[in-house]
Amino acid sequence: MSKEIYHLPIRTIHVIFTVVSTKSPAGSISFFSASKLHRRAPVLSNYQSRRRKRRVKSLVILGDKLISAHQDHKIRVWKTIDDSKYKCVATLPTMNDRFTSLFSQKSYVEVRRHKKRTWVHHVDAVSSLALSQDGSLLYSASWDRSFKVWRTSDFKCLESIEKAHDDAVNAVVVSRDGFCYTGSADKTIKVWSKKDKNHSGRYFKETSLGGERFGR
């Protein structure tokens, strides 16, 4: 078994079939063979070292794609080229999403006082990612206090829940029955659901847990 040295702590570990992926605070992502526990080539280490502002905050794997959330407010989709290389094939929001929302006043939301941005954009670090049970939807949480829902077939942004919390949203998970859970620096966990049994339509807040009870 080879001994690997990391200069920064490991924050995330994912096991996908026989592959283990790791992420460090500097943004480097590496893959290991779970059967032999030997290190495969780092996927994004060179990419991250050149661009500190693009540090990786979270990652999920969908088929042959790796989806990463970044400090620079964006989500990037990587596709396998071979066993050790990935190519960036999309950046979210996509160019089509950005273009179609650019010219409509209804597409703009206030992100700070006297400053607006189209609703498809995160305006702070994207802190967490999650996939629906069938992989058809991608969920992203951000320090901008929002979470968004994306369709994985074309990575179109379907919905944005603005001001989901009173502080940064640090985590998002989705249950098998379609409920969405978000955790925030405001010391609350919120539960979100669709209005009908088929889980169609827009998300609304089902309940909120925590608050002062989570404080010291």
Image (cartoon, grey):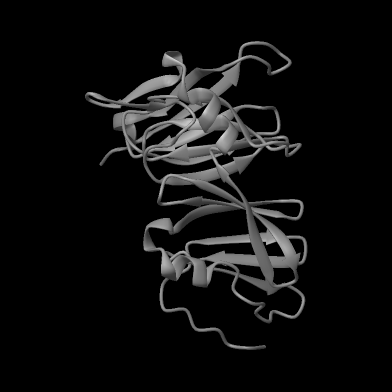
214 with respect to 182 (left or right) = left
Q: Residue furthest top?
A: 196
Could you tell me which residue is drawn at 28 percent across and 38 percent down? 215
Please provide percent x and percent y for residue 109: 38, 21
Could you tell me which residue is drawn at 37 percent across and 57 percent down? 53
138 with respect to 188 (left or right) = right
User: As displayed, is residue 60 above or below residue 196?
Assistant: below
Please provide percent x and percent y for residue 136: 72, 35
Closer-to-camera residue (67/216): 67
Closer-to-camera residue (158/5): 158
52 with respect to 88 (left or right) = left
Q: Residue furthest bottom?
A: 2
Which quadrant, please, contains the N terminus? bottom right
Q: Residue furthest left?
A: 113
Counting the numbered discs, the total is 0
User: As displayed, is residue 62 above or below residue 93?
Assistant: below
Could you tell me which residue is drawn at 56 percent across and 31 percent down? 97
User: As displayed, is residue 162 above or below residue 63?
Assistant: above
Which quadrant, please, contains the C terminus? top left
Closer-to-camera residue (181/134): 134
Closer-to-camera residue (185/70): 70
Q: Within the image, what quadrant is residue 82 found in?
A: bottom right
Q: Within the image, what quadrant is residue 183 found in?
A: top left
Please provide percent x and percent y for residue 125: 40, 46
Could you tell me which residue is drawn at 49 percent across and 30 percent down? 120
Please provide percent x and percent y for residue 180: 57, 30
